[in-house]
Image (tube, rainbow, N blue to C red):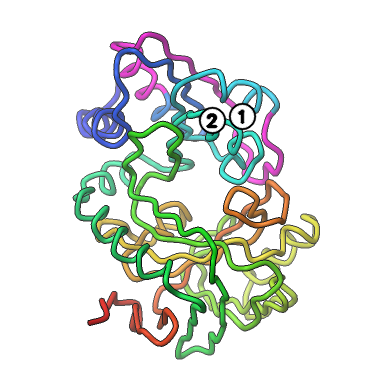
Amino acid sequence: MTSTKLNKAINSLIKDFMGIDESEIVLVIADDLTKEIGDALYENLNSFCEDSYMILLKSNQNREILPEIIAESINTVDSIICAADIPLINSQARLKATQMGVRIGLIPNLDEESLVRCLSANHEKIAEQAEFFSTLMKKTSIIRVETKSGTNIRIPIRGREVFSSTGIMRTIGEFGYLPSGKVFVSPIDDRTTGVILIDGSIDKIGVVENPVGVEVTSGFMTKISGDGEEPKLLAKIMNKSGKNARNLAEFGIGINPKAMLSGNNIEDETVEGHAHFVFGGNIGLGGNVNTDFRLSMVMTKPNVFFDDKLIIQNGKIKKPV
């Protein structure tokens, strides 16, 4: 039986964040690991929507290709809530569905505790923060990230479209992740060079015990270093994923005060003051690198500069005067 707290969070997701109404046709996508959340979504939607459907997939942590049934289905509905771990965000199918006006909310691999906690954040305040930092990022030519542990990377973004994930997706064609709370951009292709020391988490691996070093040259990951098992696991993932998987596809900052480092990259990316780097395809973000692969890495105590303005200092947001 679905808990009262989960039902409340699901109802808030559907009504407050996505604004789904009774006239809509909605598709829920879940897998073995998120079936309970998927069932709660479907039951809630089925109680008032014109029509709702649910696709249940087998969980696959290394799925790199969008299942054909999903690609064929997503542009036949009004809204989608996806709780499964599938490469939807940067796929051509998602881009086409967005262009056709389909709203898409993504909550992959979240457990009940994370979903309930993160959806309790003040989404209107997060939206205000997102607007502030999006406006600032749009005026920025180069983002610089440094840490005491050795991170030093320059990310050219001038002219790139800036995105924000506030969780509020009430307008046709909007898409984003829940829990909400990040501002992000795709770097100019082939231009980023530097070193990243990841001390938070890595998608498909979890929270790291020791910092993992990643070198980026001309926009692509060229070297992985560090102690322990995490660098070996990361190298194994990247070595079987092709060149395009090594592309630095996204950089972003988190602005959700309720989110916590949990090992789930969707939540970890939104933690207030954290910075994240995503490798893989960027077609859906304005770039030219085409792959469904997406792998996120989160840094907990960055110093982030928008041109010469200090935005985050040692993991704490610092609004410039």
CA gap, disc 2 and disc 1: 5 Å
Residue drawn at (75%, 58%), measured in percent from left and top?
Answer: 244
- Asked if labels 1 and 2 touch by Cβ distance under 8 angstroms, the answer is yes
Residue that mark 1 sits on: 58
- Look at the numbered disc 1 and give the secondary structure of its residue: loop
Q: Where is residue 289 in the image (x, y as percent from the top left)?
A: 72, 56
Q: In this view, does 317 lie to the left or right of 234?
A: left
Query: Which region is colored magenta?
Result: 39-67
Please, what secondary structure does the residue beneath circle 2 have?
strand
Lateral position of residue 68 relative to residue 210, left or right: right
* Disc ID at residue 31: 2
Work out which quarter of the rendered image holds the C terminus and state it: bottom left
Q: Position of residue 146 (x, y in %)?
A: 48, 86
For residue 315, side relative to residue 52 (left or right): left
Residue 139 versus residue 63 in the image, above or below: below
Tell me: residue 74, above or below residue 129.
above
The stretch drawn in magenta includes residue 50: yes
Q: Which mark is residue 137?
A: none
Nearest to the observer: residue 271 or residue 263: 271
Which sits in the foreground, 166 or 222? 166
- Amino acid carrying mark 1 in the image: Lys
Q: Residue at 69% across / 64% down in the picture?
A: 247
Residue 222 position, x and y percent, is 75, 75
In the picture, which quadrant includes the N terminus? top left
Residue 273 position within the rendered picture, expressed as x and y whole percent measured from the top left: 34, 71
- Residue at image location 68% in from the left, 77% down from the top: 216
Q: In which quarter of the image is residue 275?
A: bottom left
Of residue 134 and residue 292, the one placed in the foreground of this image is 134
Q: Is residue 277 above or below residue 147?
A: above
Kindly identify the residue that appears in the image at 61 percent across and 46 percent down: 90
